[in-house]
Image (cartoon, rainbow, N blue to C red):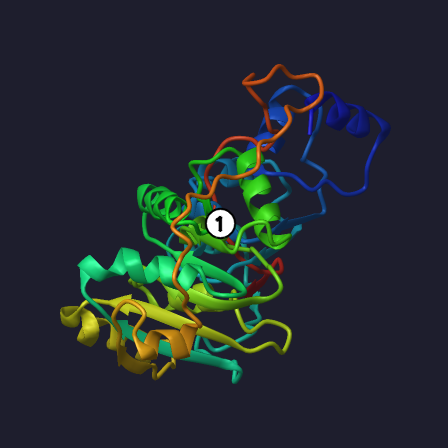
Amino acid sequence: MPYAKQIDALKRGVPIVVATPGRLNDLVEQGHINLSKIEITILDEADQMCDMGFMPQIVEVLDMTKPNSQRLLFSATLDKDVDKIVRKYLHDPVEHATNSGKASVKTMTHYLFITYSEDKPTILAEIGSRKGKTMFFARTQAGVDRIAKDLANKGVPAGALHGGKTQAVRTRTLNAFKEGLTNVLVATDVAARGIHVDGVSLVVHIDPPNDHKDYLHRAGRTARAGETGKVVTMIGPRQQKAVTAMTSRAGVDPEVVKVKPMSKELVTITGAKEPTGIAWKPPAEAPARGRRPGGPSRSGGGRPQSRSGGSRGGSRSR
């Protein structure tokens, strides 16, 4: 949103302000808002904001609010930078946890696919060609882009989502996935936090997560609202021991299956199909009103740095 609209709203007076840390700090520095009389401060997805590098901005905001005001923090985890925030800014907090940090969804089925690295690109294209929405998770931004491009070249409508994309591109990519214009969304952990898309029936860990909490977060994109879903982790023959230990910490006992391109097991479990082989390209987009084609876009979001959390002056929540 443009600064002018936000400044006009603040001048008229508002009881509640919802903002990114960076944009809020910008408006404070410009003298458009004063946080000294704020009664309640809520940090949503504190761990995600910290992961994205918003820790300094979060600290700046909290330092400008009254020390004795109520503070609530919502977070999937309460370690690292989130723990620092809790210790410094939440005095004698009340903690509320919504789950035990272990898998509890009964409609979710978990698998370990043992395969060889040379077969993985082909298998991913076959899985991506299945019917229904599929989310792939990769560890790096470069990996996400490479996989999405390879899928598209093989005829699989796929979008790439990570923090290196502009907000406009991320929004467009996510909307295309929600609306069924793409079948596959390839994402990093940070970019996919907080994403809720109905109808995702399969989640694939292309790169196994290092932490069981990340496994659960990724897996939670499927089997939502009573629907069924499957979670597949792709590993090499030598990764089984380490990944099994990680899934055990998540409270998951996955079925171990050896798969090859278009093998019976692969097709039965995922619904894999042969890709068309005809390169897919996203539909061309008309330039936004008032902008020249190829012109730069500005999205109001503020400077990076973030992670998610919950606490009530506190109440901590996982």
Placement of the N terminus among the 4 image quadrants:
top right
Q: Position of residue 37 (x, y in %)?
A: 72, 38
In the foreground, 78 or 241: 241
Q: Is residue 103 visible?
A: yes
Residue position for label 1: 157
In the foreground, 316 or 126: 126
Q: How many other residues sit within 10 Å of disc 1, few (<14), some (14-19) or many (≥20)?
A: many
Q: Is residue 47 visible?
A: no
Residue positioned 71% across, 21% down in the render: 289
Q: Is residue 33 left or right of residue 257?
A: right
Q: Position of residue 230 (x, y in %)?
A: 46, 75
User: What element does badge 1 sit on?
Assistant: loop
Looking at the image, residue 291 lies above or below residue 124: above
Q: Amino acid at mark 1?
A: Pro
Residue positioned 33% across, 69% down in the render: 233
Residue positioned 47% across, 78% down in the render: 100
Looking at the image, residue 282 lies above or below residue 31: below
Q: Position of residue 81 (x, y in %)?
A: 40, 50
In the foreground, 267 or 247: 267
